[in-house]
């Protein structure tokens, strides 16, 4: 396997050392092949919001497994999950299931262009929308981690219509629209950035984008693959009260199985084949296993107190980390929303990817290694958000902070 992994950020390139090879996971914990236990704050990069290998999700999967893993035909389970997503997410009136967040973003880009008849799009520096050619321009996630400005193999003609602006910079977006009148199909962004580290929107930023896109007849797309059902049950759009035209989702709605989805206004989604002329298909889309895991995960999240728990333990973790950093003489900043968090080794504040790049990457790599040696598994990159779950306890947070104090005192 190239680099020994199936996805680049797993390779520990930015933090040094060899990646941990997992053997099993349960709740808030992971065990490697040597039997070492870790408190896990990666959570399969977001899907494990109820905790790894949740018994109720597993039970539902076992029952459906007996009926088959893939039908290649409609399943009632698709309708159930679709109704749950539509009920929860403000922008979604119709939804199409796919198999990954990348696939969802590829599809929504085609839909934006089909609906508007325009070809250009605006994305933000450090926002990652999957590895499709047209999005690998100033992308975050593994691209940022590996220091790749773009990617060889991506034709210039493919990215010629991808315009970029700094996150949290409305004036830059206004300039792009002024320079490209009636040419921009829409704006796509992570409403809360998680692929350049954790970066929340400034006050008025999301509302400003909504106004600009409406003024110019362009579409606003929230990539909620990471934030969807994580920072609130209705995602970032419910949390901030801003309704986009289209939304991409993934991770949580598959409960740990491969899944993605895109949805939005009925008049736009009616363009998708076979209802309309914009073609998109997938053999395993809506398969019964992913739908079942998604349904059960959302049922668990709807139980009273779920998001209150996520918010409480995550705040305790981040506030504790920042306090310890201050007490041990390290510049640090960070924050959290519900079960999503991040921190940077820099004075901050961090408003965008350029700010994030000013952080001390060498210090983070040493911190990461130290935490790993003390049984805490953090994302192996300064440019990735972290995740908590319903399975994380106060005792887990206390153990993590104790390890952090030990490490930061020695750096």
Image (spheres, rainbow, N blue to C red):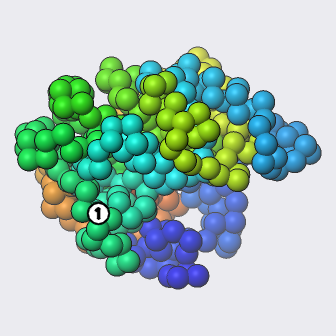
- Position of the N terminus, as image quadrant, is bottom right
In this rendering, position of residue 217 left or right of residue 229? left
Q: Nearer the viewer, residue 400 or 137?
A: 137
Q: How many marks?
A: 1
Query: Picture coordinates of residue 356 (x, y %)?
Result: 21, 56
Residue 179 vs residue 243, the one in the foreground: 179
Q: Where is residue 311 in the image (x, y as percent from the top left)?
A: 43, 30
Residue highlighted by disc 1: 159
In percent of width and height, residue 199 lies at 27, 44
Q: Quadrant of residue 108?
A: top left
* Residue depicted at x 82% and y 46%: 71
Quarter the C terminus occupies:
bottom left
Observer-nearest residue: 144 or 210? 210
Label 1 SS:
helix
User: Farthest right residue?
Assistant: 66
Whether residue 73 is visible: yes
Q: Is residue 140 left or right of residue 163?
A: right
Q: Residue at 54% across / 36% down in the picture? A: 276
The answer to whether 116 is drawn above or below residue 298 in the figure is below
Q: Look at 39% across and 37% down and name the residue there.
A: 115
Q: Position of residue 401 (x, y in %)?
A: 40, 48
Instruction: Find residue 340 and report its image quarter.
Output: top left
Quarter holding residue 67: top right
On the rendered structure, is 288 left or right of 282? right
Residue name at image x 75 percent, y 32 percent: 77
Q: Is residue 394 visible?
A: no
CA neighbours of label 1 inside 10 A, class few (<14), some (14 to 19), many (20+): some
């Amino acid at each position: 396997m190239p680099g020994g992994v199936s996805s680049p950020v797993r390779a520990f390139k930015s933090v040094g050392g060899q990646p941990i090879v997992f053997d099993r996971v349960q709740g808030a914990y992971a065990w490697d092949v040597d039997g070492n236990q870790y408190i896990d704050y990666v959570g399969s990069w977001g899907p494990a919001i109820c905790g790894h290998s949740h018994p109720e999700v597993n039970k539902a999967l076992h029952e459906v497994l007996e009926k088959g893993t893939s039908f290649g035909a409609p399943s009632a389970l698709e309708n159930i999950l679709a109704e749950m997503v539509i009920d929860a997410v403000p922008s979604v009136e119709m939804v199409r299931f796919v198999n990954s967040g990348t696939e969802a973003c590829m599809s929504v880009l085609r839909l934006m262009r089909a609906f508007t008849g325009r070809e250009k799009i605006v994305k933000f520096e450090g926002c990652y929308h999957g590895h499709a050619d047209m999005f690998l321009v100033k992308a975050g996630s593994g691209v940022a981690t590996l220091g790749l400005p773009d990617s060889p193999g991506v034709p210039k003609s493919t990215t010629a219509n991808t315009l970029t602006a700094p996150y949290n910079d409305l004036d830059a977006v206004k300039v792009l629209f002024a320079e490209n009148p009636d040419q921009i199909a829409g704006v796509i962004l992570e409403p809360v950035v998680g692929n350049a580290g954790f970066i929340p929107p400034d006050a008025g930023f999301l509302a400003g984008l909504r106004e600009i896109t409406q003024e110019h007849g362009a579409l606003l797309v929230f990539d909620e693959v990471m934030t969807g059902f994580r920072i609130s049950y209705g995602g970032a759009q419910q949390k901030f009260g801003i309704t986009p035209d289209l939304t991409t989702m993934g991770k949580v709605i598959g409960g740990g199985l491969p899944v993605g989805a895109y949805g939005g206004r009925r008049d736009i989604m009616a363009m998708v084949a076979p209802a309309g002329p914009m073609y998109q298909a997938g053999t395993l889309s809506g398969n019964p296993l992913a739908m079942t895991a998604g349904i059960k995960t959302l049922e668990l999240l709807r139980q009273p107190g779920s998001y209150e728990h996520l918010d409480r333990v995550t705040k305790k973790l981040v506030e504790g980390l920042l306090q310890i950093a201050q007490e041990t003489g390290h510049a640090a900043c960070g924050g959290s929303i519900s079960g999503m968090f991040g921190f940077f080794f820099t004075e901050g504040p961090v408003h965008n990817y350029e700010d994030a790049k000013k952080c001390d990457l060498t210090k983070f790599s040493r911190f990461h290694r130290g935490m790993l040696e003390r049984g805490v598994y953090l994302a192996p990159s300064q440019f990735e958000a972290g995740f908590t779950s319903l399975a994380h306890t106060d005792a887990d947070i206390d153990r993590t902070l104790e390890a952090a104090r030990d490490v930061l005192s020695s750096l």
